[in-house]
Image (cartoon, grey):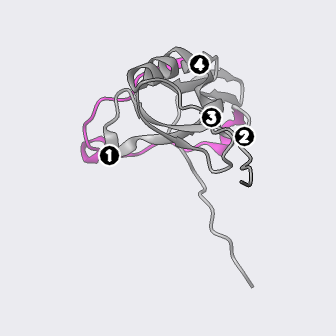
Amino acid sequence: MRWKLVHRYIGPYEILQIHGSAIELDLPNDMTIYDTVNISRLKVDCTDISRIARRPPPSLVRTRPAGTSYVIQSIANHRQSSEGTGWEYEVKWDGWDETHNTWEPEDNMAKAKEMVKQYWKEIGGWPKEKRKTTRRKT
């Protein structure tokens, strides 16, 4: 017999609204579950606050009633994407130190187009595309 280990509880998350036995939670956009759950699926957070390291929370921007996204402080670096079709950017998040920087694909930077333009301007412009040339035999 095989057992699969899973996280039974995740969070804590802020409660936005209560509709009888249904609770609407402020879940991150990338979670693949509905924002509204039955109250029987929740548990009280009994975390001892005194044991949690004190640091300011990251800046949040509400993107929809039940979701959040983080604010980009700056772009630290860039690299070619693994597919070779675009760029990935090393993002420094507002309210987090450099150890929490992440590599984000170009598609995720849609709301930070001006910051991306400014980054390329500061480092000397967009790289030139390599042209395919054919060599002539002499």
Q: Nearer the viewer, residue 18 or 1?
A: 1
Q: Nearer the viewer, mark 3 or mark 4?
A: 3
Q: Residue at x 30, y 29 (%)?
A: 56
Q: Earlier in the sequence, mark 2 or mark 1?
A: 2
Which quadrant of the structure image shows residue 8? bottom right
Look at mark 4 in the image and give the residue it sits on. Answer: 111
Look at mark 2 in the image and give the residue it sits on. Answer: 33
Q: Residue at x 52, y 28 (%)?
A: 14
Look at mark 1 in the image and give the residue it sits on. Answer: 48
* Distance from the alpha carbon under mark 1 to that under mark 3: 54 Å
Number of disc labels: 4
Three-letter amino acid code of the residue under disc 2: Ile
Q: Earlier in the sequence, mark 3 or mark 4?
A: 4
Q: Nearer the viewer, residue 27 or 76?
A: 76
Q: Secondary structure at mark 4?
A: helix
* Distance from the alpha carbon under mark 4 to that under mark 1: 37 Å
Chain part drawn in magenta: 36-62
Q: Are marks 2 and 4 in contact (CB under 8 Å)?
A: no
Three-letter amino acid code of the residue under disc 4: Lys
Q: In the rendered structure, find residue 129 and report the number of the disc placed on it.
A: 3
Q: Nearer the viewer, mark 1 or mark 3?
A: 3
Asked if residue 26 is positioned above or below residue 132 in the image, the reply reads above
Q: Secondary structure at mark 1?
A: loop
